[in-house]
Image (spheres, grey):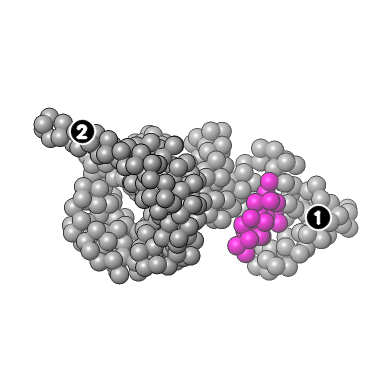
Amino acid sequence: MTSLLIYVALAGLLAQTDPTEETLKQAIGLHQRGDVEGAIQGYKNYLAVRPNSPLARSNLGAALARTGRYQEAVEQYQIALELQPGNAGVELNLGLAWYKAGETQRAAEAFGKIHEKAPDQLQPTLLLADCWLAMGRDKDVIRLLTPLGEQRPDDLAVAYLLGTALARDGQIVPGQIIIDRILRKGDTAEARLLIGTTKLRAQEYPAALVDLAKAVEMNPKLPEVYTYYGQALLRTGDAPHATEAFRKALEANPNDFGSNMQLAILLKEEGKVEEALRCLRRALQVRPGDPGARYQMATVLLRDGKADEARADLEQIVKESPEFTEAHVTLATVYYRLKRKADGDKERSIVQKLTAAAQAKQQQGINIK
């Protein structure tokens, strides 16, 4: 909206000398008064005459984004940047449009470019960190935000994002420092969520459930609170309430990776194949190529009787991730179902070797302790 205001005076001056500009001035006026649909039509009318106006393209993108038409907004921002490369405001708006459209990887790329050019700008840096968290890039978030956390020790947004990444990465001691910093501001939902996720990581499931239930009670709108609450419920044997929690998480954010994954697994067990596949497609939209999501997709296809489709996916997964034991197990099952005994036996042999190696590694760890 700030960039829109900057253009108001300019549009007024232009309208005095060029009647065509009156169309743009009127569209901006409608936009400011909240008549977004009227503004959209006005911008389009203007662009029909002046298609190379970065101002009108950017404003049209902003109006489209206001109505939730993010893909259309993206198109307008991209054209605006072709006409006026390097416009920082449009670059940020493009990233936000990708972000709100659930195109997390593209949003991260947009925010990353802004951060490279202007590393001191807080908003794109935090948005980049949030995208990386959604993509599971916890170590990148830690690298990005650790200096910022030292510079801004009282910034709860920085502390929360950094603390979440540390908890997920299993860095308990640095994570606890962040939690203590947040707790100094009082017993908050953010602190409870961080404590709960840390306990989940440590497999202290009943204790995690207590903290996560409190976080939900204190702020049910906190991002990912229902995702982790659902995981704790699932780990403590309450699948029905876990399903409910994952659904609530997806009501708030349809592109939540963890909830899409967990709900898909539960739906698969219930035989709800189509809904499970929808969840997995959304998960893969957030983390393209994720082997876990692709594996679950293959298991759903197998559950639906599409063994040959599952086979093709599993063969690619084990090729890319040769130590993915569960994928080898399922691929062996698929081969036997397809009457390919020799291939099934080969996969079973691989599973035996991987299992033996894992057991030996675990025993070595026990002996070292």
| Residue 361 circle label | 2
Q: Which mark is residue 97?
A: none
Q: Residues within 10 Å of mark 2 (few under 14, many from 20)?
A: few
Image quadrant assignment for residue 1: bottom right
Identify the residue position indicated by label 1 in the image.
Answer: 47
Asked if the stretch drawn in magenta spans residue 65, the answer is yes
| Span of residues in magenta | 58-78
Q: Is residue 61 left or right of residue 206?
A: right
- Could you tell me residue 293's position as x and y percent? 43, 50
Picture quadrant of residue 187: bottom left
Between the C-alphas of marks 1 and 2, the distance is 65 Å
Magenta segment's dominant SS is helix
Number of numbered callouts drawn:
2
Q: Secondary structure at mark 2?
A: helix
Indicate the position of residue 334 as horizontal and vertical percent values.
40, 51
Q: Is residue 297 visible?
A: no
Residue type at the position of mark 2: Lys
The residue closer to the viewer here, 47 or 108, is 108
- Name the foreground residue: 181 vs 114: 114
In front here: 106 or 93?
106
Above or below, 166 against 69 in this view is: above
